[in-house]
Image (tube, helix red, strand yellow):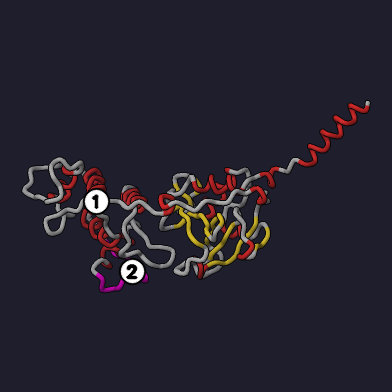
């Protein structure tokens, strides 16, 4: 009888010390899951791996960790408990006012003043909540929506450059895509570029876009490994696809008399390209592969 009592007491002791599901979730696991989707493009209303908006992304990640949170940013901001900026812990939701009308953006705090989120310009990416150029001025607050066992958290390792730095699309890669999208054919040509030999892997595509007058090089070079700016691509896309129409835009970095303004307005009219959350177009920003693919996808819709 004494032995049976000891066994029963031991079982009872174990059962009362096992944490519930909410406290068993690891913030390290949450961050690891969230980082798996870095680079996924932004999609308004999106909540799948094809594309996320900000709250669709946070809901998706928490669901992956077995935690249910509401769908919209406003609903997420209304739940849980408020957390001071100085008391943030990994796994807290952080909120921003990007529209000027209250809470409009959400991300997941991952430590060291950084958060992971689905940005309209870069898709899923990592940013600083104190970024003086943008996020720092728009920070609203944070909510703790899940109970994590923070005592067991392993220090989060610094983000590597490959996780944060976007991949910029090259001129040669753009040539290859345009050849396929426009159905261009390679014909005999007298065009030559000193930096593109016939052995170059993108030779045929480069010659095809050059022959078609879609875009070419400068000073006898094509510079196949160089990037294009968003402004340069605006001109190429408008002329290559024969886009027309014009929408009045007011991007903070695009003067009305800039050479690319006409092309940017045409892209806006055709819903092909849009600007960043801070009201700029990114006139001189190098074009990323995600941005370029999004433009091509919209042209095919």
> In this orientation, which residue lies closer to the viewer: 59 or 11?
11
Farthest-out residue, left: 190
- Residue 292, given in percent of the width and then of the height, sits at 32, 52
The dominant secondary structure in magenta is loop
Is residue 229 located in the magenta-colored stretch of the structure?
Answer: no
The local crowd at label 2, few if under 14, some if 14 to 19, many if 20 or more residues have their Cα within 10 Å, is few
Disc 1, SS: loop
Farthest-out residue, right: 1
**Which span is picked out in magenta?**
245-258
For residue 225, the mark is 1
Residue at 26 percent across and 47 percent down: it is 173
Is residue 252 located in the magenta-colored stretch of the structure?
Answer: yes
For marks 1 and 2 on the same chain, the one whose residue lies earlier in the sequence: 1
Disc 2, SS: loop
For residue 214, the mark is none
- Left or right? Give the position of 80 relative to 32: right
- Residue 82, given in percent of the width and then of the height, sits at 66, 62
Residue at 56 percent across and 62 percent down: it is 95
- Residue 162, given in percent of the width and then of the height, sits at 41, 50
> In this orientation, which residue lies closer to the viewer: 229 or 235?
229
Q: Is residue 246 visible?
A: yes
> In this orientation, which residue lies closer to the viewer: 149 or 49?
149
The local crowd at label 1, few if under 14, some if 14 to 19, many if 20 or more residues have their Cα within 10 Å, is few
- Residue 126, given in percent of the width and then of the height, sits at 48, 55
- Residue placed under numbered mark 2 in the picture: 248
């Amino acid at each position: 009888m004494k032995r049976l009592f000891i066994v029963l007491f031991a079982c009872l002791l174990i059962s009362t010390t096992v944490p519930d599901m909410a406290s068993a979730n690891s913030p390290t696991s949450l961050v690891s899951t969230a980082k798996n989707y870095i680079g996924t493009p932004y999609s308004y209303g999106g909540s799948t791996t094809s594309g996320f908006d900000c709250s669709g992304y946070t809901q998706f990640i928490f669901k992956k960790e077995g935690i249910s949170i509401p769908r919209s940013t406003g609903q997420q901001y209304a739940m849980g408990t408020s957390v001071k900026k100085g008391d943030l812990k990994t796994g807290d939701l952080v909120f921003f006012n990007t529209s000027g009308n209250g809470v409009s953006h959400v991300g997941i705090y991952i430590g060291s003043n950084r958060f992971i989120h689905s940005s309209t310009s870069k898709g899923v990416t990592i940013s600083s909540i104190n970024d003086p150029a943008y996020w720092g001025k728009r920070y609203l607050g944070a909510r703790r929506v899940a109970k994590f066992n923070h005592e067991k958290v392993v220090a989060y390792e610094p983000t590597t450059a490959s996780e944060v730095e976007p991949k910029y699309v090259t001129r040669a890669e753009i040539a290859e895509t345009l050849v396929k999208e426009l159905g261009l054919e390679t014909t005999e040509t007298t065009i030559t570029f000193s930096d593109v030999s016939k052995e170059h892997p993108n030779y045929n595509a480069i010659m095809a876009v050059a022959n078609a007058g879609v875009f070419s090089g400068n000073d006898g070079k094509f510079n196949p490994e160089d990037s294009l700016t968003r402004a340069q691509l605006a001109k190429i896309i408008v002329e290559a696809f024969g886009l027309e129409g014009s929408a009045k835009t007011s991007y903070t970095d695009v003067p009305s008399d800039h050479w690319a303004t006409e092309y940017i307005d045409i892209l806006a009219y055709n819903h092909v390209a849009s600007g960043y959350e801070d009201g700029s177009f990114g006139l001189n920003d190098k074009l990323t592969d995600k941005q370029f693919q999004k433009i091509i996808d919209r042209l095919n819709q």
